[in-house]
Image (tube, helix red, strand yellow):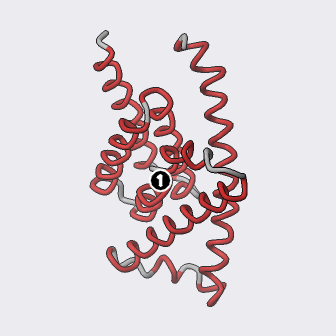
Amino acid sequence: MNPKSKQIAMGGIFSALCVALMFFTGLMPFGGVALPMAAGAMLMLIVVELGPKPAAIAYISVSILCILIVPDRQAVMIFAAFFGYYPIVKQRLERLPGRAIEYFCKLLLFNAGMALAFAVLIYVFGMAQALEGMGDFGIYAPAILFAMGNIVFVLYDFAITRFYTLYVERFRSKFLGK
């Protein structure tokens, strides 16, 4: 098989898996957060196999497709605003000098992405009910949401690093012969 055809096919398969994961976000509890994370992990595989440029193209195409066909707008915005491109920029962030600077930049990127996602949901899509569901927490709801989100992000960063290691060291060498 032509190497270029193989790259296109692999990118298409992983992109299709991302869209499929995103389509089922409304069918399970916490699916609106967990499945965008899993879809981002699929894009990490494109980074490993094809590089960051094809992964960026896949991210853009998956984001556009999800905007058009996925009914869960909140999950789409979470994917498009952060979890879709994070696996692409993760390796560059990990090259920064010092763990403190690395995690500061990662958390800054995460919080900016989540703020953007909620701003688009509220002001562009008119989904103010996203904040009404947090009424029990009062004025502290956004701060509590962001604090919990940061904890989940740190766990996600750890998990995606382990997933990358497992894929490269076990699956890729055993099944793909690389």
Image position of 156 with respect to 120: above or below: above
Residue at 35 percent of width and 40 percent of height: 58
In the displayed structure, does residue 174 sit left or right of residue 24?
right
Q: Which of 100 and 6 is in front in this view?
A: 100
Point 64% across, 57% down: residue:
153
- At which x and y percent is residue 118? 46, 73
Which of these two is toward me, 89 or 161? 89
Q: In this view, does 86 lie to the left or right of 58?
A: right
Quarter location, residue 162: top right
Q: Tell me if residue 1 comes above or below residue 147 in the rendering.
A: above
Q: Name the residue under label 1.
A: 25
Disc tally is 1
Q: How crowded is mark 1: few (under 14 residues within 10 Å), some or many (20 or more)?
A: many
Corner quadrant of residue 51: top left
Residue 16 pos. (x, y %): 37, 36
The relative height of residue 116 versus residue 101 in the rendered view (above or below) is below
- The residue shown at (38%, 46%) is 59
Position above or below: 170 against 177? below
Which amino acid, by three-letter code, is at mark 1?
A: Thr
Q: Position of residue 144 (x, y in %)?
A: 67, 77
